[in-house]
Image: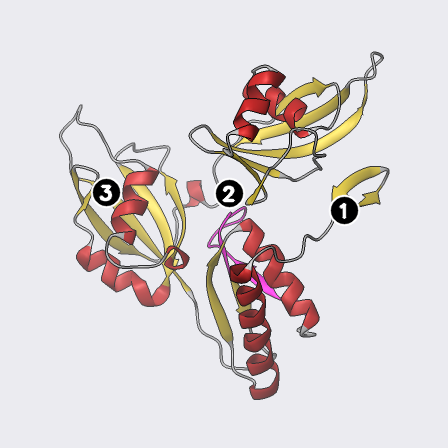
Amino acid sequence: MASSSDSVAVRGFIPPQNDEERRLMRRVEELCRVALHRGIPRYTGFLSDREQVLARAACHRAAFPEPDFRGGYDGAERRVLCLEPPDAWQEEPLAYLQLRALAAAGDNLPGHRDYLGSILGLGLDRACVGDLLPDPQNPAVFYAVVLADKQQLIAAELTSAGRCPVQAVLCERFPDHLLAGPERPLQEATVSSLRADAVLAAMLHTSRARAADYIAAGRVEINHLPLHAPHESVYADDIFTIRGVGRYRLAAIGGKSRKERVFISYFQY
């Protein structure tokens, strides 16, 4: 399903695909009703890209005007839906932590997966944690945005990540050099068509046969939904998740070359 904007196809809304997604939409609709009819601000946990699409659709269905999504900085991937009626009392749903590895020089430092696993190991749900960003100025430091009511617990209980002792320190905000989000160099390529296997092969710098193997093995998702066939069409702003490889966003689809190949731009998360 697609619509057209300036002659470039974009992916249309994909309805909920399972009970979990339907429950999310019902929950958001109920939060909208509480916010609208009782004038009480309501907030979700952190939502993935796909969940944000569903939540926005639920807000529109519940006639909630201008839903606000916040992730702690411009360009955040995971964001909280904030339903705040005009003139209502509001609270800040987000808080920030500095995560510092207490390791000797040369030791293996924990990464994103280590920190996330350790935080979830405290008994918290994934929805309690937003983006985790490495500090480009200090390899021993990560920053995390979390739900405000979980900040104190994480700061008190998080003592290790991977095999490394760590310290979690409360902070008021991300430092200035992180506020614009991580730099992601834009890459360009040409593809023979906008089939999933052709675009995936270009982004991974591999063959279409290898890309098709990833798809057949069930290792590829687009916008957090499984990709079932290599011939499926892709659209601008699609997010590819390849298990064990990484995540990519198809940033733009351009015109065609003299050889009828399609120009694309993309970046890796």
Name the residue beneath numbered marker 3.
Answer: 100
Pick the front one: 174 or 267: 267
Instruction: Tell me the amino acid under the disc marked 1.
Output: Met
Would you say the magenta stretch is mainly helix, strand or loop?
Answer: loop
Which residue is found at the position 51% from the left and 43% from the top? 180
Estimate the spatial distance between the alpha carbons at disc 2 and disc 3, rounded to whole Å: 21 Å
Which residue is found at the position 37% from the left and 57% from the top? 146
Q: Is residue 87 visible?
A: no
Left or right: 115, with 208 as reference point: left
Mark 1 vs 3, N-terminal side: 1
Name the residue beneath numbered marker 1.
Answer: 1
Instruction: Tell me the amino acid under the disc marked 3.
Output: Arg
* Image marks 1 and 3: residues in contact by CB distance under 8 Å: no
Query: Badge 1, how many Cα within 10 Å: few under 14, some, many 20+?
Result: few
Tag nearer the camera, 2 or 3 = 3
Magenta stretch: give its range. Answer: 65-80
Mark 2 vs 1, N-terminal side: 1
67 magenta-colored: yes
Q: Give the SS element for disc 3.
A: strand
Tag nearer the camera, 1 or 3 = 1
Pick the front one: 9 or 159: 9
Rendered image quadrant of residue 263: top right
Estimate the spatial distance between the alpha carbons at disc 1 and disc 3, rounded to whole Å: 45 Å
111 magenta-colored: no
Which residue is found at the position 60% from the left and 17% from the top? 209
Residue 100: x, y in percent? 23, 42
Which residue is found at the position 18% from the left and 57% from the top? 157
Q: Give the SS element for disc 1.
A: loop
Residue 190: x, y in percent? 71, 18
Q: Give the SS element for disc 2.
A: loop
